[in-house]
Image (cartoon, grey):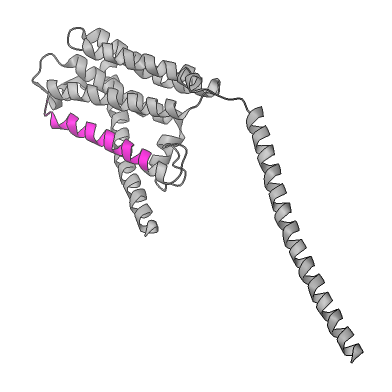
Amino acid sequence: MQKAETSTEEKESREKNKKKKQKGGCFTQVKERKRKKAVTKIVSSMADKSRPQTSKLTIYLYIPNIIGYIRILTNCFAFAICFSNKQLFCLLYFLSFVCDGIDGWCARKFNQVSTLGAVLDMVTDRISTACLLVILSQVYWPSLVFVSLLALDIASHWLQMYSSFLLGKGSHKDVKDSTNWLFKAYYGNRMFMAFCCLACEVLYITLFLLAENKTENLVDVVMTSTRGESPHSILIGLSLLGWMIKQVVNVIQLKTAADACVLHDIYKK
């Protein structure tokens, strides 16, 4: 009997010891986790302190962003005098367009790439082109041509920006996953993209300079300007080529971005 009682007591004491060890192990694990979290917080806080803090004012005063502000002021003044001084308007408008390339170069050169700069660049480009297309719609017939070009330009770029945001891309120019070779070539080759954009703007500026009154027939002016082999005719021809490529890219961009939005809705469900 005594042996049986002793064995029972030993079992109970063993079970108590096991429970104590299990509790102690749990407490140890909890303490270890807390310790690791505390260490992680300390390390992250030290990293944040060692990292240079950039103020909002610093980003606002980035060199490419300052160029963007100058572009906006230049365009405002240019459109204010567009009918009173055509030559100066075209000069200022083209200067603003050239600054579009300069601010991008400065952003990469001085490591001052910012989201504000990218948005400012996009908005300035779209508003400048839209304003010029509105002016051309007032001096040429049929005006619906320029209104349609304005709608295509804004809609395609806005949808491209939004679809890039949905896909988590850092830039609307990231089209590596696209299957369309022209779309990839446009955004993948800076020189090709620059040619198309330059051709488009040169064509619009030239059309504005050629308009002598507010009832010009667009087809007649274009056909007359492309006749012969003069430098002026060659310039118009090259501009038309780049302009057509850019409009095709805008249509592809519109369709591709719309497909991305639809696929996002499908996967979300």
Q: Quadrant of the N terminus?
A: bottom right
Identify whether 239 is placed above or below 189: above
Left or right: 254 in relation to 180: left
User: Where is residue 217 shown, x and y percent of the image?
Assistant: 11, 24
Is residue 142 inside the magenta stretch?
A: yes
Identify whether 190 is placed above or below 35: above
Identify whether 16 is placed above or below 131: below
User: Where is residue 175 shown, x and y percent of the image?
Assistant: 44, 42
**Residue positioned most to the front:** 2
Residue drawn at x 26%, y 8% as measured from the top left: 88
Res. 94 visible in picture: no
**Residue positioned most to the left:** 215
Count of marks, rendered view: 0
User: Where is residue 122 shown, x and y percent of the image?
Assistant: 36, 28
Place residue 209 in its image quadrant.
top left
Left or right: 43 in relation to 8: left
Place residue 5 in its image quadrant.
bottom right
Is residue 226 inside the magenta stretch?
A: no
Residue drawn at x 10%, y 15% as measured from the top left: 213
Residue drawn at x 19%, y 34% as measured from the top left: 148
Using the image as rendered, state which of residue 92 and residue 247 is in the foreground.
92
Residue drawn at x 86%, y 80% as measured from the top left: 10
**Residue positioned most to the bottom:** 1
What are the residue bounds of the magenta stretch? 141-162
Identify whether 196 is placed above or below 266: above
Res. 41 visible in picture: yes
Using the image as rendered, state which of residue 62 and residue 228 is in the foreground.
62
Q: Quadrant of the C terminus?
A: bottom left
Using the image as rendered, state which of residue 38 and residue 196 is in the foreground.
38
User: Where is residue 220 shown, x and y percent of the image?
Assistant: 13, 24
Left or right: 143 in relation to 100: left
Q: Main secondary structure of the magenta part?
A: helix
